[in-house]
Image (cartoon, grey):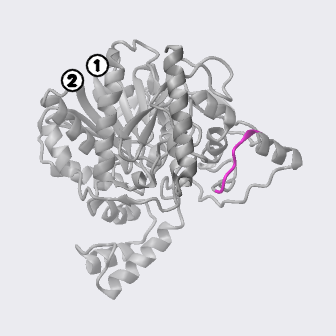
Amino acid sequence: MSLRLRLAFRLLFCYCLLLAAAHPSSRRLLPLLVVSAAERTNVASLPGLDGALPSRFETGYVTVDEENGGELFYYFIESEGDPGADPVLLWINGGNRCSVLSALFFEIGPVKLAIEPYDGGVPRLRYNPYTWTKVASVLFVDSPVGAGFSFSRDPRGYDVGDVSSTLQLTKFVNKWFSQHREFLSNPLYVGGESYAGKLVPFLLQKISEDVEAGVKPVLNLKGYLVGNPGTGESIDYESKVPYAHGVGIISDQLYETILEHCGREDYANPKNATCAQALNRFSELMGEVSEAHILYKKCIYVSPKPDDGTIGRKILEEIVVGNHRPPRPPMDCSTYPNYLSYFWANSNNTRENLGIKKGTVDEWVRCHDDGLPYSQDIESSIKYHQNLTSRGYRVLVYSGDHDSVVPFLGTQAWVRSLNYPIVDDWRAWHIDGQSAGFTITYANDLTFATVKFIGQGGSSGEAHYGRTCHRGPEQALDDY
């Protein structure tokens, strides 16, 4: 950039600052000025990780809402194999505006948090030997706006829903590949779990429409995979009752009462007193277990208490601690890594290394519980599954067999409802000579599989999720 052009930009910036200072709503407008244009960051190292990253790691922002200044943040990690030919997997997270950093750290990414007592500094990382990036490049996206490090300059940009956030993701995909044209010929898959499993087929629908319309850039779209996926249908909830009965959480008597008196009613809004009473008892009993993984201990949270004043001072010096600092669970609790992730993501070193734009996200939280507006306006995703499978896209639907949030019984039922002929009947699939779950394949490249000992969001025993699911999108579709 020439000296004259740099001076012009500086003068323009100063002029905008003066206007903002004079404007009566300058407090709301000022954040609009500190946000620069979309940019990419090549991440050379990660705080807490001893040693080099196993492959190229890039972060960045893509503007998806020009009117309100909404930008989605991403982590792109190239394949450790052949990034020029290996598949690209776009991954989004489920939950209530939950950051995709959870998937990167706890499920399929190349690094994970070391489970050790927190000492007030940046939590340590270790390599994940079962990362999907051994065989695929993975594009992790914080979506919708407001999740993770994604943000909106104008607060009105946070008012999104299933449809609008997915359309923003479609725009993200188009813009990202326009800036990364070297990956246009790579097979493209999209994946997500839990609530994201409801959005993934709609996203595929929109991307496929662009592909078939010849919208540039043309992507090599191949298929998708969804884990423990919600659909928006009542089966997501109603399947909890037979599942809980089958694993011994509720009695025969309660199960029979619910079947007799609730029938085909909406379980969320029972119309008769006997049904309501039975469902209340059902909820009480389910509250005795960890619903995300029924074999896990039900954690009791305790407030964080630093061991001494030194740790407290270290937190204040190195970590940006805000109003949503999570309670500290016991180390043997499955949510302890979630606790560590808060301090890792809010480290000033982390933010600098990742290229986080200053003034955009003051405090990173793993999931939002502060009431940001969101419309659940996709009533059912099953019609999109039907449409995509009938058009030749490869699909893997998998369920952890210890998840009671979206039990495999309900998922198996709606997959069967698509009424495709069976190509490969129910059988075990294996890892190291042992059954790792069970699977069935239907016509139109549709596969359903269970994964042993897996719960919601990949929660599992030590390394089990990685060992059973580390093969990447194409290998997973081939192996189940």
Question: How many numbered circles does the render carry?
Answer: 2
The circle on residue 218 is: 2
Give residue 343's quadrant in the image. top right
Residues at marks 1 and 2 touching, judged by CB atoms closer than 8 Å: yes
The answer to whether 117 appears left or right of 445 in the picture is: right
Which residues lie in the magenta part? 318-323
Q: Secondary structure at mark 2?
A: loop
Furthest residue in direction right, as rendered: 309
Residue at the location (62% across, 42% down)? 341
Residue at the location (61% across, 39% down)? 345
The circle on residue 400 is: none
Indicate the position of residue 308 as horizontal and vertical percent values: 88, 49
Residue at the location (62% across, 58% down)? 299
Residue at the location (63% across, 50% down)? 333
Indicate the position of residue 151 as horizontal and vertical percent values: 47, 45
**What secondary structure is the stretch in magenta mostly built from?**
loop
Within the magenta stretch, is there residue 321?
A: yes
Q: Secondary structure at mark 1?
A: loop
The answer to whether 205 appears left or right of 89 in the picture is: left
Within the magenta stretch, is there residue 105?
A: no
- Residue toward you, 207 or 25: 25
Query: Reading the chain from its start, which is encountered first: label 1 or label 2?
Result: 1
Indicate the position of residue 214 as horizontal and vertical percent values: 14, 26
User: Which residue is labeled 1 in the image?
Assistant: 184
